Amino acid sequence: MAEQSETSVPTLPAVGFVRLADVLKLIPVGKSAWYAGIKEGRFPAPVKLNKRASAYRVEDIRALIERLSSGEAA
């Protein structure tokens, strides 16, 4: 992602992956609520990038934002 200050809202790249910290700047929920939403199927699951790193597909996050902004239940 482009370099940003800690308080700025990140912009999503056209394609690729974003880390949880950036997702939570766009979707105002806490980590516990996010992980519960994944377990319940409301939020997209992460993709393992390697043994220790996971990230979220940009297209999945865009779809979630679209769904939330259209008023559809998470």
Image: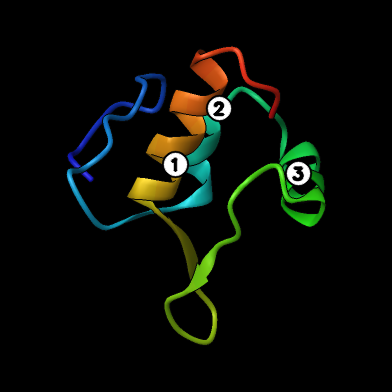
Could you tell me how many numbered marks the image carries? 3
List x then y, in percent, for residue 33: 79, 37
Do labels 1 and 2 touch, CB within 8 Å? yes
Q: Is residue 59 visible?
A: yes
- Distance from disc 1 to disc 2, alpha carbons, whole Å, reads 9 Å
**Residue ID for mark 3:** 37
Element carrying mark 2: loop
Name the residue carrying label 1: 61
User: Considering only vertical position in the picture, is 26 above or below 45?
Assistant: above
> Which residue: 55% across, 34% down?
24
Callouts 2 and 3 close, C-beta under 8 Å:
no
Position of the C terminus by quadrant: top right
Query: Could you give the CA–CA distance between mark 2 and mark 3, rounded to whole angstroms?
Result: 12 Å
| Residue 22 appears anywhere in the view | no
Of badges 2 and 3, nearer the viewer stands 3
Location of residue 27 in the rendering, given as x and y in whole percent from the top left corner: 55, 27
User: Hey, what amino acid is under mark 2?
Assistant: Ile
Front residue of this view, candidates 41 and 24: 41
> Callout 2 environment at 10 Å: few (<14), some (14 to 19), or many (20+)?
few
Residue sitting at x 51%, y 43%: 21
Which residue is under mark 2? 27
Mark 1–mark 3 distance (CA, rounded to whole Å): 13 Å
**Amino acid bearing label 1:** Ile
With respect to residue 49, does 72 lie above or below? Answer: above
Mark 3 nearby-residue class (10 Å; few <14, some 14–19, many ≥20): some
From the top left corner, tell me how far across and down residue 59 is, in percent: 35, 48
Using the rendered view, name the quadrant where residue 22 is placed. top left
- Mark 1 or mark 2, earlier in chain: 2
Quick one: 27 or 44, which is closer to the camera? Answer: 44
* Apparent side of residue 9 relative to residue 67 in the rendered image (left or right): left
Secondary structure type for disc 1: helix
Mark 3 residue type? Gly
